[in-house]
Amino acid sequence: MNWKLAWIIVIVLPVMVACGQETKKTTATSTSKTTAEKTQTKKPKADPIAAGKRVYNTYCLTCHGQKGNMGASGAHDLTKTKLSLAESIKVITEGRGLMTPHKFLGEEKIKAVAKYIETFKVK
C-alpha cells in the first residue's frame, strides 16, 4: 500500500502539476508609431447625448422613466422642465427634494446627462 502512495507522489503528481501549468510566450514586436500615425488613429470623442443616455438609463430611469415623464417617487416631469442646462447640471450634482445628489458621477457624465435631458423638453 505504501508503494502505491509513494508511486503517486513521486511520479504521477509531478506529471499532473507540469501538465496543468501554462507557459506564456512573449514576442518582441515593434509597435512604435510616429506622432502623425498616433494622431490619425485617435478615437473620435463620444457623442455626449449617447453618453448621457447611458448614464440616464443607469441612474435616472427608475424615477423619471424612459421619456422623462414617469414621475415615480415624486420625480419631476423632465418634458415640462424650465431649467437651463446649467441649472440642470446643478440639480443633478446637488440633488433636489427627494432626489439624491449625483456628484459621484463626475462633471463629464453629469453634463452628458443634462444634455440628454434637454432632448426630452417639449418645444
Image (tube, helix red, strand yellow):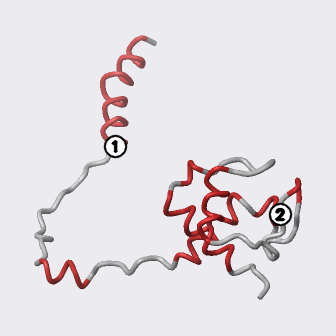
* Lateral position of residue 95 relative to residue 71, left or right: left
Residue nearer the viewer, 14 or 81: 81
Query: Which percent across, then down, holds residue 96?
Result: 74, 51
Query: Which percent across, then down, holds residue 66?
Result: 79, 72
Q: Quadrant where the C terminus lies?
A: bottom right
Per the image, label 1 sits on a secondary structure element best described as: helix
Query: Which percent across, then down, holds residue 63?
Result: 82, 59
Q: Of the residues shown, which amino acid type is indicated by label 1?
A: Cys
Per the image, label 2 sits on a secondary structure element best described as: loop
Q: In the rendering, which numbered label is found on residue 19? A: 1
Rendered view: 66 above or below 91: below
* Lateral position of residue 102 relative to residue 35, left or right: right
Residue nearer the viewer, 26 or 100: 100
Q: Nearer the viewer, mark 2 or mark 1?
A: 2
* Residue hosting label 2: 76
Q: What residue is drawn where x is 13% and y is 76%?
A: 33
* Lateral position of residue 46 relative to residue 103, left or right: left
Residue 110 found in image quarter: bottom right
Q: Of the residues shown, which amino acid type is indicated by label 2?
A: His
Residue nearer the viewer, 81 or 70: 81
Residue 54 found in image quarter: bottom right
